[in-house]
Amino acid sequence: MRSDPRALYFRKKFVVRKAVRRATLDYTALGIVKAYCNSEAFGEEMLTPGWTDYNVRIPYYSVDFTDNLKVGANTLTFALGNGWAVGKIAWFGDKSYMSKPLLWCRVCIEYEDGEEEIFGSDDSFRMAFGQTLENDLFDGEVQDGRFDLGDFGHSDYDDSEWMNAVMYHGYTDRLERAIVPLTLKKERFVGKYLYEKDGFLIYDFGQNHAGVPEIKISDASEGSELTFIYGEMLDDDGSVYVKNFRTAKVTDKYICRGGEQRFCPEMTFHGYRYMGVKIDGECRLQSIESRMIYSDIDFRASFECSDKNINKLYSNIIASQKSNFINVPTDCPQRDERLGWTGDAQVFGLSAMYNADCRAFFKKYLQDVRDAQADNGMIDSVAPIVWSDFDKVKGSPAWGDVITVIPYEYYHVYGDDSIIRENISAAKRWVDYCLCDSVDNIRNPRGYGDWLSYDGGTDKSLIGTAFCGYSALLVSKMCDIIGDGDSGKYLEIFENVRNAFRKRYITEGGKLSSDSQTAYVLSYSLQMMDADEIKEHLVRCIEAQGYHIATGFVGVKYLLPTLCDIGEYDLAYKLFTSTEHPSWCYPVVNGATTMWERWDSYVVGRGFREQGCNSFNHYAFGSVAEWMFAYVLGIRFENGCISIKPIIDESGSLSFASGSYRLDKAYVEVSWKNLEGGRTALEIHNSSDVTVDLSDYSEVERVSESLYLIKR
């Protein structure tokens, strides 16, 4: 159990004796920490050092703070909260890593004359409790402005009533330089006042997001109390909808000290679009804003087309990726969960890499996955691992296969084989585990299946067997890439599993025994069956669903690519642009600003799905972004090289599409527009290392260096 819900504040006064060439600060916490020098924060960071398995490694960050120093007295200060190490995790209550947060830092000052001075966290630091009375990532933050410590970063501050810091030994052997970028405050949204409901002033920020409010308060009487609640949606009665948060309180409180002040939580975050504020006492809300937070990764891609719903869909995908890329790729940022589900990451990984530079982010996450791997090779369903008995499903297909799929896709996007070298051993052990969990090369039925599907549920053993074979094939290919001699062994495993799959699941009429959209797209995409074998049956399954999507998390990634690969381009575009339920655009036309967890998280006339599993900010169904780039725009990766091979819409669903991808010096911009007379204008701007493939079109006229006319 946690010993104290309050935050701790630390200060260390030190003297800079002469001119400084360079000064660096290394710092971390078991908990979350924010650092300052002479009262100046090092940017707008939050939740440092993030989440990992602290029993294995503790990441630390480094900052150059030369420009923050002055000759003479200086002060380092830190705010220390509970975070993942000490606070609640998911719905499990206080089963955390530590009973209290701990701070670690190291300062190195290099003087101009070559002298070096090093000091670190020890009992010479002073510490005190302050205005943050409670802090928890899931429950929220309670601040009492009457206990504000003032400017304790000033060198003349009187800390005589503060305590000496208490030293704890150990843990330093786990320190490692952090891989993933810091989590920062990013976009700013202004709250729009809607109305008062049940004593709460209701504000709309216009965008569902992960973040924290920034509230300026004036004319406050001392002791006035403000209560803040948050929600992704409004309930039918107009109140802020909080039922889907489950046990998470998601509530902040601020008690005024009088006059003007500012409230912004620093040791929690919420997932919300709407905020309710209840005021007990007297004060005036001078401004209401919210700051989106996410890992500092570069979102450089773009996508736009003739369908405004699709444009909003892509915006929603980006918003959900940002909201859930907070040090770990989480499922959702709002309820009592926020776990690094491996299946969600596996499905969305390539889409994420199209959208942003995810090199450091996925390197760190795959490290978390390896840390969570069991001795027998089993990959947990979440990473970082919560504790060893969390995963009651154990070794779920499509979840555990994150250790083969993401490294393989990462290599092809970025051309960096170090990702394979780092993960190949874990990938082999995962495939070996899958074989041990099989009988005659058929996986035992286990796992989450095609989570949240509409087609009655695809056979879990079929899913598991297909993924087992596919992962073996990926391991074989990765061995070839790095010159590992086990390539033949895992290729043989793939062939054996494929033969077993075909014998077990393909009936005499060519149908699969599990006759579903997901079964066919997985069988093709995971290379258990060929295109001509699944074409008729997949189209039939889609027709049977009224030309609607019926897949869940697992199958959705492969649906549109499979349709294009089998030549069903018009059907792919029809599904893509549909606004009927279920479809990608159904949430869009119902006001969504992020991706929903379910196809029917909310249905007009019926209302909300059951509150127990109903997030409005889940990126998994956003895996369609991969198809948007790879097929609509035709931007594809192989061995770190980019090629362009667009699938131009001839159905009339889209009349134009354009987009771009950029990484380091490589860039590509693609735009096509359908003209009269069955011709398409295709414009491509690219760096020299990008190749254009228009071989599928019989008539191609090159008008200029970048413009082509294509006969469709």
Image (cartoon, rainbow, N blue to C red):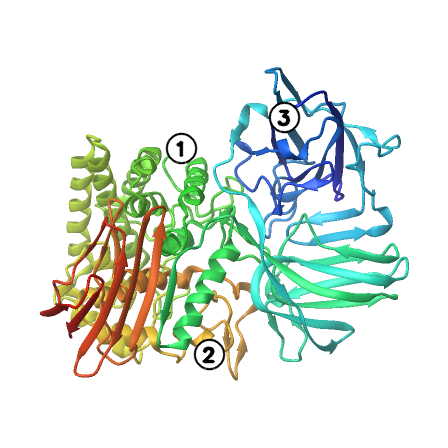
520 or 70: which is nearer to us? 70
**Tag 2, which secondary structure?**
helix
Relative to residue 122, is residue 75 depicted above or below?
below
3 or 1: tag closer to the N-terminus: 3
State the CA–CA distance, disc 2 to disc 1: 48 Å
Residue that mark 2 sits on: 589
Local SS, label 3: strand
Q: Which residue is at the far right?
A: 222
Q: Amino acid at mark 2?
A: Val
Residue at the disc numbered 3:
106
CA neighbours of label 1 inside 10 A, class few (<14), some (14 to 19), many (20+): few
Residue 705 screen position, x and y as percent: 20, 61
For the question of whether residue 350 can be seen, the reply is: no
Q: Which residue is mark 1?
A: 375
Residue sitting farthest toward the left? 698
Q: Nearer the viewer, mark 3 or mark 1?
A: 3
Q: Quadrant of residue 549?
A: bottom left
Spatial CA span between label 3 and label 1: 35 Å
